[in-house]
Image: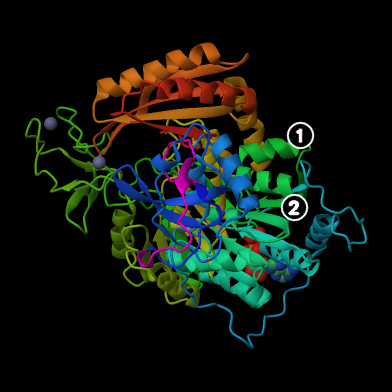
Amino acid sequence: MAPYLDLVFDIPAKERFTYRNFSEDPSPGKGKNQAAFGKRAMAPFGKRELLGYIVAERAEAPPGMEPRAIREIRRVVDAEPVFGEEDLALAAWISGYYLCSLGEALAAMIPSGRRFMSYPSLYQEGDIAPSPPELSGEQLRALEALCAGLPESPAGSEGPKPGGSFPMFYLYGITGSGKTEVFLRAAQEYIRQGKSVIYLVPEIALTHQAAQAIASRFGPLAATVHSGMSPGARLSQWMRARRGELRIVAGPRSAVFSPLRNLGLIIIDEEHDGSYKSGNTPRYHARQTAMRRCAASGAALLMGSATPSAEAWKLMGDGLITRLNLSRRLAGGEPPKVRTVSLEGTQGCLTPELKEEILQTARMGRQTILFLNRRGFAYFYHCPACGFELTCKHCSVSLTWHKGKGRAVCHYCGYSEAPPRSCPNCGSLEAGFRGFGTEMIEEEVRRTFPGLTVRRVDADSMGKKGDLEETLGLFRSGAVDILLGTQMVAKGLNFPGVRLVGVILADTGLHLPDFRAAERTFSLLVQVAGRAGRYFPDGKVIIQTLRMGDPVIEKSAALDVEGFFRAEIAQRKTLGFPPFTRLIRFNFRSRDPERADKAAARLAALAGPLLPPGADMLGPAECPIGIIAGNHRRHLILRGPAMGPLHGAASTALIRYDKGKDSRVYVETDVDPVNLL
Ligand code: ADP
Ligand code: ZN
Ligand code: ZN
């Protein structure tokens, strides 16, 4: 038993901390687990007690450290190690790339559960998997290319090539072209050859349907993880993967860390999806992390989408990713007919064209999806007399009127207040809420079509666990005519009955001060349009807009991915934005605006002289959303042609900044930011 242990904690401190192990026989109060590399232990830290990760065992105290001054760990949490050398190497990479501490990286990777909890498997002994469809020619060709590197494949017998090069594929197929089937077959092939597979899906898309398909194909070899699981249940799945009991793990972003043995393939479904980027430290991207895992193990990377990210699109263009095309719908559908309609001059939010199509669809006994990316009833409060706008007390954003709750609500911090009866500034009675959200659409749709059944799906209506499943189940069964909602209805849904998709207002995200606004709007519109006509060749989409003729909306309506990227990529190149440059963003938060300003200016002054050739700095500036929950927000963005040198500058600047930093300003680093608000 090693007398000393090095621990790291889920705190920003970059150091490893040495502790003394228990003496030979741990006293009763300390539990019976022995300390060892890879386990977690409770240890005194300052006046607190923290959960630490044992990253090394050591025979002697570190040089220069007085052995008697070294504190003893309190308790070992785990009976067996929860991480190994490979996981530690991945954590070290995360900490280097995303500029966080090793402890923060391990905390993001390893489920926080302390005890194992069983989780009911979707698979039941004796379940018979429905026989999969016969692959189309395109699907077969894609599958053959994907398996060409496997030893038993007829195309060749190159084994894995650890240490850098690994094959990257992109299954680029229109919505409904059967990408899922190719993913599942590829996974089967890799598993048959003794490899294991990680299957990543966007946060909310792991519907029961997808989980069920995976469970029934792979039986007890498969596990799905999702955000609704308890930490203990997640830890159990993690340990099953580690012990080699699982061969395929499906789940959102964090499933990329699954400690599967003999990793052969990582699949990233809907590669463009924003939920693959973490919103907290470490702000890792599952795609970047997957690339690193593949480089370390020689595993293949397979991404797929109908609307690739600009990054992936460029890599395909440069020939670094092999593109595999699926160009047809296979379940009897065809790409829908899309029409754009001006919303200008319409009373309410439904144009005559959209109303007519909804009626027509209902007469045919088919279903409609209505999409608007805005919650609540009315969007902002404006006074035409004095120009007053009602904003949150703690954030620099407008309050949204939620009629059902009878409150004006802040979507950023949750603050709410009773809506004013007249303008709080000048008393004008003309002041009021303008714009519309899903709640208002629901009211108008119910009023206009009293005979049709309507269900709304958004963060407000789907309060309880299981609400979403239930509503989607009702829609699938045909008991609901119109499904209405935010992004939640835009992604991944595969319903035979849907003939019509109506986009209430396509422009909501276009004006945002973020260079990805066009890309996001485009992929969202194409994805939501892709819900129509998957099983019958008469799908219709109506896109309502206040910006008739806007090129992004026109390209979306034409479902023209190539055309969109031709223009978008050219513009990114001109403006010097990713994928032509890389970014590192620093966010500063403080209760005190002056402190935030000073801190941002100080880091800028430190980073400026360190910038590598060709790099520059944007800001420091106030963030587009200047205040959230009482915190004043500033940012500074480093931009350069390559990540390596930019990293060097950023980390050196941060180290210098940390000496003498203002402890009342919180600084967060975001490498490859996807959100600049
Ligand atoms: P995507 O992920 O590309 O949007 P899906 O994987 O959801 O598309 O497939 C759309 C539909 O096509 C599904 O209902 C699926 O069962 C069906 N499908 C997939 N492959 C085939 C095939 N080879 N023959 C017939 N139907 C298929
Ligand atoms: Zn007023
Ligand atoms: Zn707020």
Front residue of 400/285: it is 285
Front residue of 327/275: it is 275
Please give left or right for residue 497 compared with residue 628 in the image.
right
Residue picked out by circle 1? 318
Question: Measured from the top left, where is residue 352 in percent x and y?
Answer: 40, 53
Which amino acid type is marked by label 2?
Ala
Question: Measured from the top left, where is residue 392 in percent x and y?
Answer: 21, 39
Looking at the rendering, in which quadrant would you find the C terminus? top left
The segment highlighted magenta reads: 6-29
Residue picked out by circle 2? 299
Can you tell which quarter of the image residue 593 is in?
Answer: top left
Q: Earlier in the sequence, mark 2 or mark 1?
A: 2
Above or below, 438 against 661 in this view is: below
Question: Measured from the top left, where is residue 57 in percent x and y?
Answer: 56, 49
Which amino acid type is marked by label 1?
Asp
Front residue of 262/614: it is 262
Please give left or right for residue 396 compared with residue 509 in the image.
left
